[in-house]
Image (tube, rainbow, N blue to C red):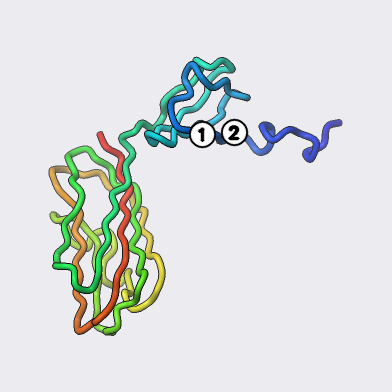
């Protein structure tokens, strides 16, 4: 009987995840049905439904984008960034505090222009503590919009961070 430790990696715990720059179609022969391939140049995800190099199906296309923005205590508020259109889907978002704000009254809130603070309200982010604050509720965008970071620095003389939002485009 073959033991788990003797199996080649392709057989370990389901699908094997591979990737490189460019589409695998006509180029990469999958090692097994269900193998996942990530096109690192375009962000596309493929899954093999056969064992030839033409058996790849695009399951998540390049419409998957990350929208990044940096901010400091001195950034004008509100900070509006990223364009959204009807049908876009917000998949996840983070606010990372890289340098703490030095006023305990400082506040940050991440949302949309149409609904400020709806993603990460002020009680979900503490700009006086180093760290990354996550949200992942999937939201479907109903109309033209953009993201909004409300920055209330108080009397802070320092503080900075980054926002990353993952969006599936229609």
Q: Which residue is mark 1?
A: 19
Q: Quadrant of the C terminus?
A: top left
58, above or below 91, in the image: above
Q: Residue at x 41, y 29 (%)?
A: 59
For the residues labelled 1 and 2, the Cα–Cα distance comes to 13 Å
Is residue 102 shown left or right of residue 134? Answer: left
User: At numbered mark 2, what does the secondary structure look like: helix, strand or loop?
Assistant: loop
Q: Quadrant of residue 109?
A: bottom left
Residue 158 percent coordinates (x, y): 27, 78
Q: Judge by depth and name the residue closer to the eye, 113 or 42.
A: 42
Q: Judge by depth and name the residue closer to the eye, 160 or 1.
A: 160
124, above or below 141, in the image: below
Q: Residue at x 56, y 17 (%)?
A: 50
Q: Quadrant of the N terminus?
A: top right
Q: How many marks?
A: 2
Q: Which residue is mark 2?
A: 15
Question: Mark 1–mark 2 contact, CB under 8 Å?
Answer: no
Is residue 143 shown left or right of residue 161? Answer: left
Residue 145 percent coordinates (x, y): 15, 48
Residue 25 percent coordinates (x, y): 47, 19
């Amino acid at each position: 009987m073959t033991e788990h430790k003797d199996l080649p990696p392709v057989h370990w715990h389901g699908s094997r995840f591979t990737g490189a720059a460019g589409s695998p179609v006509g180029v990469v022969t999958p090692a097994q049905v269900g193998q996942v391939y990530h096109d690192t140049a375009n962000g596309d995800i493929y899954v093999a439904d056969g064992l030839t190099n033409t058996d790849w199906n695009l399951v998540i296309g390049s419409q998957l984008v990350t929208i990044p923005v940096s901010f400091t205590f001195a950034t004008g508020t509100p900070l509006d960034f990223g364009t959204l259109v009807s049908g876009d889907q917000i998949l996840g978002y983070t606010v990372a505090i890289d340098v703490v704000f030095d006023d305990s009254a400082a506040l940050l809130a991440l949302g949309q222009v149409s609904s400020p603070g709806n993603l990460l309200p002020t009680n979900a982010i503490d700009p006086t503590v180093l760290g990354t604050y996550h949200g992942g509720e999937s939201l479907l965008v109903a109309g033209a919009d953009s993201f909004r970071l409300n920055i209330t620095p108080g009397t802070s003389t320092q503080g900075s961070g980054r926002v990353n939002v993952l969006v599936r485009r229609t």
